[in-house]
Amino acid sequence: MNSLLIVLTIALVSLAAVPIARVWRSRVAALAAGALAAFGLLVLSFQLLGIVAAATGRPAITAGSALGVAAMLCAASWGIVWRRVRSRSEEVPAADEPRLRKGRPEGGGRHDRPHTALIVVLIVCGVFLAIAVSSGLSGPPRDWDVLTYHLPRTASWLLHGDLGVYGSTGAFYPSNAELPILALFLTGSDRLVPIVQLPFALLAALALYGIGRKFGTSVASASVAVLVFLTAPIVLFQTTIAKNDLVVTGLVLSFTFFLLRSLDSAVDGRGRVREIAAAGLALGLALGTKYSILPFVAVAVPLVLVFHALAAEEPGRSSFRRALGSTGILVAAMAIPSLFWFVRNMALAGNPIEPLSMGIGHWAASAGLGQEFQFVPSRAFWWVFPMMDRHIDSTYSGGAGFGAAFAALALPGVVLCAKRG
């Protein structure tokens, strides 16, 4: 019975994301926004139940309650967002959405064959999915981090019916990535837990394709980037481990994609709000997933302000105010999926980012380079990692190994993109 309730819960949050995705006319942006919205609504469902449990002191997280909250969010999405989608005026298709004309994208050359490139991508994605799913389902959850704190933390929530802090290592960490695991645990089985990161690998690939198209690359070139990403061993093996690195990767790439869209001169005021809100949602979901994103956020927020000020057609005081408004929207959107964890930690430990200190220097120290040196023969070679492609214990794992395709194509690709710009 619980399995059916959780299936319905996931179906409802996915259905609730449809009106949100329909705001975007670009297929790539709509898919990315829909995926972000579905994940965000699932996160929000459990966070609301966590608030109820904390306020009442009673267990509130069950398969039935999760379904009830998801149903309310779905009704709100269709009742509010869908009405606005239907009534909005017609918009110009986005620049990253090629219009096919006689088999060619608008502005494409003779050698730009989108059909062939996309067919190859679909084939590789199919192989990638088959390998990841079969490998992930071939055994129980594994990996030191997973068995030490990712799953014990989630199991504690399951037992107590809340999102409190219990004795496992890393109990104070932000945990958006563990909430889908909690949903799977509510079915009574951990069978699907090893492939919980798989959807985020696909989201990362989609965002990477969109970024390539925003930089003006052809469909074929953007597809090559997707192929290199999906065939990198570090990505493939992470899809079979219930960690959160690929979750953050997909979210950060989505943030970058929507930020680039928000800077497009063809985007009007309402469209800019929409794009920056999506970027903020992606970054907020990442901020509520992993502490190592803190230095990135500390740099990204002021850069968004600078980028939007520089992107204004008529620089001046008014353009700075608009840029400040865009940054405010970004921060507000970031807070929605991440604030719960920091408020919880503040209430329980007096420190929103427990066990870290509030000093920025401590953030940097906690994400130092010491661990990374194991992937290269000596420290002098760290600057060319991952081109060295050294893997640990003579085998690829979720911790290292980017593969020959990355080493061969990554640097030439960066040079070609720079020349294109």
Image (tube, rainbow, N blue to C red):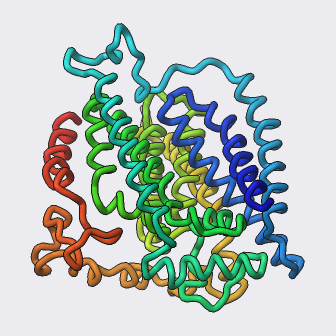
- Going by the picture, which residue comes out furthest to the top? 102
Q: Nearer the viewer, residue 353 or 146?
A: 146
Instruction: Left or right? Give the position of 217 relative to 344.
Output: left
- Going by the picture, which residue comes out furthest to the front? 138
Instruction: Left or right? Give the position of 179 relative to 237.
Output: right
Question: Where 287 falls versus 312 (above or below)?
Answer: below
Q: Position of residue 151 (x, y in %)?
A: 57, 77
Instruction: Left or right? Give the position of 322 relative to 366.
Output: right
Which residue is located at x 78 percent, y 44 percent?
Answer: 74
Q: Position of residue 400 (x, y in %)?
A: 27, 69
Q: Nearer the viewer, residue 272 or 121?
A: 121
The answer to which quarter of the image holds residue 395 is: bottom left
Q: Position of residue 374 (x, y in %)?
A: 22, 81
Residue 339 appearing in the image: no
Which residue is located at x 68 percent, y 56 percent?
Answer: 42
Which residue is located at x 47 percent, y 55 percent?
Answer: 198
The quarter in which the N terminus is drawn is bottom right
Residue 61 appearing in the image: yes
Question: Where 164 falls versus 132 (above or below)?
Answer: below
Q: Position of residue 196 (x, y in %)?
A: 53, 61
Q: Nearer the viewer, residue 149 or 188?
A: 188
Which residue is located at x 20 percent, y 64 percent?
Answer: 386
Q: Nearer the viewer, residue 14 or 292?
A: 14
Question: Where 164 falls versus 385 (above or below)?
Answer: below
Question: Where 155 falls versus 270 (above or below)?
Answer: below
The quarter in which the C terminus is drawn is top left
Number of marks in picture: 0
The answer to which quarter of the image holds residue 154 is: bottom right
Instruction: Left or right? Give the position of 41 relative to 51.
Output: left
- Going by the picture, which residue comes out furthest to the bottom? 167
